[in-house]
Image (tube, grey):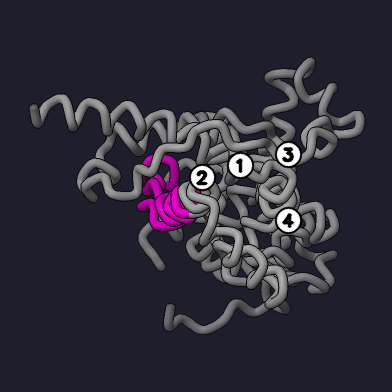
């Protein structure tokens, strides 16, 4: 992006044109974040709108201790998690008390299938993409938010920790758990695909 | 997995390993173990591939209508075709 960097001063002063530039710059990422955490297009749109409405109100008091991106992602992630909580109050309640995810330790791999040799076209098919989305949506909110920020939004471990307001060690633990669970789901899926591919060849 | 205790210890460090941020000594221990443990090698390779697939995924584009409704909600309709 060759555009001039956003002026915090103008944003704090309520400059509409500068706010519109901020929306143009960050709305695609905020939308994707909402979509991947909530796994629902309407919820993602609500998250998107609420994030910028809240940002507009809060900007005058924004001190710039974190970057603008980190700050926006924090608002968006909290909104998305709130949407999930509203939808499934009973599930998230359990998780809030101590986060069962971290007490279980690291899941032991069950699927030992080497699917790395599958043709590239197989891995990039729309069916595979749908399976990847399903697998990610199957993660608990705590694991999913870490995975989305780190692996889909491309934030570093430190930035992810900053957005979520947790220690880096917590991010690392959740990340390895999330990735191993996704590996498990994709291995089950690709294992079946490999059987089909070899059956077709016979 | 043959050497179950050892494999479990290594599992926790796999994320750092595929990111290339694992501490040198641990990394050496892991690579040594991988030479003799076929199952762990499969887990590492498929874990790396899993992470790559997600990281390289084409981001879903934000629909134009969603963009329009966002600007409308923010009373920024006049900036619709800029930027």
Labelled pair 1, 4 in contact (Cβ < 8 Å): no
Q: CA distance from mark 3 to mark 4?
A: 12 Å
Pair 3/4: label in front = 4
Instruction: Tell which of A172 and A44 is nearer to you.
Output: A172
Q: Which residue is mark 1?
A: B2
The chain to which mark 3 is attached is A
Image coordinates for residue A45, horizontal then vertical, percent: 53, 37
Quick one: label 4, few (<14), some, or many (20+) residues within 10 Å? many
Q: Tell me: A109 left or right of A12.
A: left
Q: Return the disc, 3 or 4, that comes first in the chain's sequence.
A: 3
Quarter of the figure with residue B83: bottom left
Query: In what element is the residue under mark 4?
Result: helix
Q: CA distance from mark 2 to mark 3?
A: 28 Å
Instruction: Tell which of A191 and A56 is nearer to you.
Output: A191
Q: For the magenta stretch, what is the residue range? A: B45-67
Q: Which residue is mark 2?
A: B39
Q: Which residue is mark 3?
A: A142
Magenta stretch, main secondary structure, is helix
Q: CA distance from mark 1 to mark 3?
A: 32 Å
Q: Which residue is mark 4?
A: A172
């Amino acid at each position: 992006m060759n555009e001039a960097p956003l002026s915090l001063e103008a944003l704090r002063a309520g400059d509409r044109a500068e706010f519109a530039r901020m929306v143009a710059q960050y709305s695609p990422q905020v939308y994707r974040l909402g979509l991947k955490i909530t796994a629902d297009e309407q919820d993602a749109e609500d998250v998107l709108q609420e994030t910028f409405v809240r940002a507009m109100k809060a900007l005058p008091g924004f001190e710039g201790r974190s970057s603008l991106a980190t700050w926006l992602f924090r608002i968006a992630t909290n909104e998305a998690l709130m949407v999930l909580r509203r939808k499934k109050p009973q599930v998230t309640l359990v998780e809030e008390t101590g986060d069962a995810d971290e007490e279980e330790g690291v899941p032991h791999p069950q699927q030992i299938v080497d699917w790395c040799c599958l043709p590239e076209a197989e891995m990039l098919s729309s069916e595979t993409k749908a399976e990847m989305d399903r697998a990610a949506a199957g993660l608990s909110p705590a694991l999913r938010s870490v995975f989305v920020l780190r692996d889909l939004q491309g934030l570093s471990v430190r930035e992810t920790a900053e957005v979520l307001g947790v220690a880096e060690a917590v991010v690392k633990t959740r990340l390895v758990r999330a990735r191993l669970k996704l590996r498990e789901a994709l291995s089950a899926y690709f294992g079946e695909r490999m059987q089909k591919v070899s059956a077709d060849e016979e | 997995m043959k050497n179950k205790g050892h494999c479990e210890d290594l599992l926790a460090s796999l994320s750092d390993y595929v990111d290339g941020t694992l501490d040198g000594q641990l990394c050496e221990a892991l690579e040594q173990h991988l030479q003799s443990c076929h199952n762990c090698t499969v887990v590492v390779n498929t874990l790396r591939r899993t992470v790559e697939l997600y990281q390289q995924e084409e981001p879903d584009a934000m629909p134009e209508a969603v963009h329009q409704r966002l600007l409308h909600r923010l009373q920024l309709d006049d900036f619709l075709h800029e930027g």
